[in-house]
Each structure stands twice: as structure tokens, then as C-alpha cells.
Amino acid sequence: MVGFLSTIKLFTLTLVFSLPLGLILALALISKRNCLRYPVELLIWIIRGTPLLLQLLVVYYGPGILLQMNIWKNGDSGRFLASLIAFVINYACYFAEIYRGGIQSVPEGQREAGKVLGLSQREIFIHIILLQSIKRILPPISNEVITLVKDTALARTIAVYEITWVGQTYIRSKGIVWPLFYTGVFYLLFNGFVTIIFSKLEKKLSYFKV
């Protein structure tokens, strides 16, 4: 039960923080200010070009090596926080590219129409650009969310007590394999639930003809 709850918690908190952070990074990507765009482009290039497993190790062990001090709390809470930060940064970068593609796919004429109607830049972005982007970004977002469900297993690399860690513990301590079967069933059911949710969202948003 502890491993199950830890997996759900990591998954949920990663989405809660990475989705809005990804939008902020996307806005920086499309900004005309080089001081904003270039650092974000570099960050995304690094994150997308290296494995999440390596990023977990760097986030958890890196500060201790560079600063000669443990910035994470001792015990499970510290390891969980480190894994959460690594997951949020990783997925925010992927979501940023998805947001960027969706925003830039909206025809320029839509922006011009908003200006003609007297809308502010903020109103144009929220009521025209962002709304029309939702329909297009939903499928790739759903793919990333499904990947996140499976990637939570990587947290065991820094000894986060998630559900895969529990299954492996049973193998080592009792020499039985069947817990891994239930672990696989959990991921299948979880991904099935996520797929159904996104399928319903796509149908609900079908009135956006883009």
C-alpha cells in the first residue's frame, strides 16, 4: 500500500507542477527576448538529450558532491522530494515543446482578428490562442502522461519506495515473482484509466474545430 500511494503521489504532484511550469517555459521559448529564450532552449536541449535516470542521479547526488552538504532531508521524504524535482523539470521541458507547437500552430490571422476586435494581448492569448491550442496538444499531452505513469518506476533508482521497489523487495526477501505480476497489472490499469480520461476530454473538446 505504501508503494502504491507513493507512486500515485509522485505521478499527481509531477502533473500539478510540470503542466503550468511547461506553459511558462513555452512562453519563454516563443518570446522575442533572447535573454529569456536562449536559457530555456539550452535547458530543454539538455533535459531532452539526457535520460531521466541520469537526471534523477544528478538532482539527488549532485548538490552533495558540489556543495559538500546534503540539501535533502534524510530518509524517504528527502529522496521523494529529489525525485519529484527531477520529474517536474523533465516533464515541464517536454510539455513546453508541446505547448509551443500548439500555440504556434494557430494561424496568425486569428491574432489579427483579435486585435481588430479590440482585445488585449492577454485576452487574445487566453480566449483565442490557448483555447484553439487545447484540441491540438491534448493527444501528445496524453502520451506524455501515460509515459509518466511508467517512468515513476525510475524513482526506485534513488531508493524511493514506489510500487516497483515493493515488488523487487518481495523477490529478494522471499524469492517469489508473482508480486511483479500485480505491479504490471497496476500499471496497465492506471494507464487504462488515464487513457479513458483523455479520451473523454478529447470528445468533450471536439467543438474546437482546428
Image: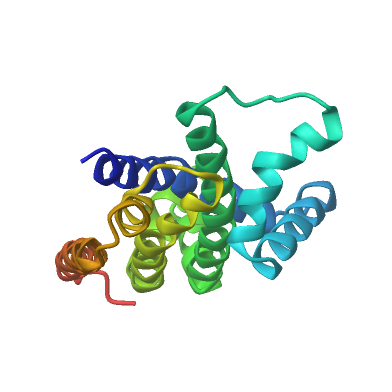
Residue at the front extreme? Answer: 174
Of residues 69 and 84, the one nearer the viewer is 69
Where's the C terminus, which quadrant? bottom left
Q: Name the spot of residue 127 as percent of width and height, x first.
A: 38, 51
Judge by depth and name the residue closer to the eye, 85 or 162. 162
Using the image as rendered, state which of residue 118 and residue 194 is in the foreground. Answer: 194
In terms of depth relative to the viewer, which is nearer, 99 or 106?
Answer: 99
At horizontal 58% and vertical 55% (from top left) the residue drawn is 90
Seen at 77% across and 47% down, the residue is 36
- How many marks can you see? 0
Residue 83 is left or right of residue 131, and the answer is: right
Q: Is residue 146 above or below residue 58?
A: below
Q: Position of residue 166 (x, y in %)?
A: 32, 50
* Residue 151 placement (x, y as % from top left): 44, 61
Q: Is residue 202 left or right of residue 61?
A: left
- Residue at 69% x, 66% y: name it: 50
Q: Is residue 189 above or below residue 58?
A: below
- The answer to whether residue 118 of the structure is visible from this angle is no
Is residue 86 at all visible to an observer of this figure?
yes
Percent coordinates x, y for residue 8 in the rendering? 29, 45
Give the colour scheme shown.
Answer: rainbow
Please name the residue shown 53% across and 43% down the image: 83
- Quick one: which residue is furthest to the bottom in this view? 210
Indicate the quadrant containing the N terminus: top left, top right, bottom left or bottom right. Answer: top left
Location of residue 26 (image quadrant): bottom right
- Please indicate whether residue 79 sits to the left or right of residue 130 in the image: right
